[in-house]
Image (spheres, rainbow, N blue to C red):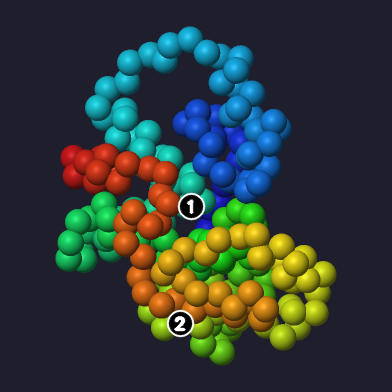
C-alpha cells in the first residue's frame, strides 16, 4: 500500500495550520508553521468554494495520515450510516486504533501511535491488535502486551501519564495503563480539526 514518506511538516505548511503531526514538538518554536506565519504575514489569495472543500478534505487526510482511497472508504462508510454523514465521519476516524492510542496519551502523535500498534505492543480483549486502522467498539479493553510492559518506553509513558487527560468516552487505569472504550464519542468530542460539512460537499459533487 502506498504511504506518505516525505516530511510531515510539509503537510502542515500546505494548509498553513498546525495539525499536530509531530505531537508536542508542534507546540515549540521549532514548528515550521509558526515560523512560516511570522515570515509570510500579508493576505491570502481568494479561494473558490470547491477549493475550500478540497482544502478541508486534504486537511482531514493529513491529520489522520490517510491516503485518498483509504479516506474515501471511511467517507463511504459514514455515508451509509444513519445520522449526519460529517459527524459519522468524525466518529469513525476517532475510533481508529492509532487515534485511540494517541488519545490515551500512549503516544505524542498519530504516527508514533501507528508505529506502536504495528509493532504489536497492544492487545484488545486479549487478542493481538496490530492493525492501525481497526475500529474500536464499545466495551473493548486495551492492554499493553506483557513483553511491552518491560521496555523503557512503557516506563516513560507510565511516568508521564498522570499529566495527560483522557477523552470522556475512554477510561484509563493510570497504574496499569489498561484502558476501556465505554461509549462511542460524539462528533464534538473527537477534537477533529477539519470542517466535516465541507468534506461532505466535496464528495457530493
Which quadrant of the figure has residue 159? bottom right
Q: Secondary structure at mark 2?
A: loop
* Residue 184 vertical placement versus 13 (above, below): below
Task: Measure the C-alpha gap from mark 2 to mark 1.
Answer: 21 Å
* Image location of residue 52, percent across then percent down: 31, 30
Give the left or right position of residue 151, taking residue 68 as reference: right
Number of marks in the rendered image: 2
Closer to us: 186 or 72: 186
Residue under the point 36% across and 65% down? 185
Closer to us: 198 or 3: 198
Is residue 84 visible in this depiction of the protein?
Answer: yes
Is residue 111 visible in this depiction of the protein?
Answer: no
* Image location of residue 40, percent across then percent down: 56, 14
Q: Earlier in the sequence, mark 2 or mark 1?
A: 1
Residue position marked by numbered label 1 in the rendering: 64
Residue position marked by numbered label 2 in the rendering: 140
* Residue 175 vertical placement versus 84 (above, below): below
Mark 1: few/some/many CA within 10 Å (<14, 14-19, 20+) = many
Amino acid at each position: 500500500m502506498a504511504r506518505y514518506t516525505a516530511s510531515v511538516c510539509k503537510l502542515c505548511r500546505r494548509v498553513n495550520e498546525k495539525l499536530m503531526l509531530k505531537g508536542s514538538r508542534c507546540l515549540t518554536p521549532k514548528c515550521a508553521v509558526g515560523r512560516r506565519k511570522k515570515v509570510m504575514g500579508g493576505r491570502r489569495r481568494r479561494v473558490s468554494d470547491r477549493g475550500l472543500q478540497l482544502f478541508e478534505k486534504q486537511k482531514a487526510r493529513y491529520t489522520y495520515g490517510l491516503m485518498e482511497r483509504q479516506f474515501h472508504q471511511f467517507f463511504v462508510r459514514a455515508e451509509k450510516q444513519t445520522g449526519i454523514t460529517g459527524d459519522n465521519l468524525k466518529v469513525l476516524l476517532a475510533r481508529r486504533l492509532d487515534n485511540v492510542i494517541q488519545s490515551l496519551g500512549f503516544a505524542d502523535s498519530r504516527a508514533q501511535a501507528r508505529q506502536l500498534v504495528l509493532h504489536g505492543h497492544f492487545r484488545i480483549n486479549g487478542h493481538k491488535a496490530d492493525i492501525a486502522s481497526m475500529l474500536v467498539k464499545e466495551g473493548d479493553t486495551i492492554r499493553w502486551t506483557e513483553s511491552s510492559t518491560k521496555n523503557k518506553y512503557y516506563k516513560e509513558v507510565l511516568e508521564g501519564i498522570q499529566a495527560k487527560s483522557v477523552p470522556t468516552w475512554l477510561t484509563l487505569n493510570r497504574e496499569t495503563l489498561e484502558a476501556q472504550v465505554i461509549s462511542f464519542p460524539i462528533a464534538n468530542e473527537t477534537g477533529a480539526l477539519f470542517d466535516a460539512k465541507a468534506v461532505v460537499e466535496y464528495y457530493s459533487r
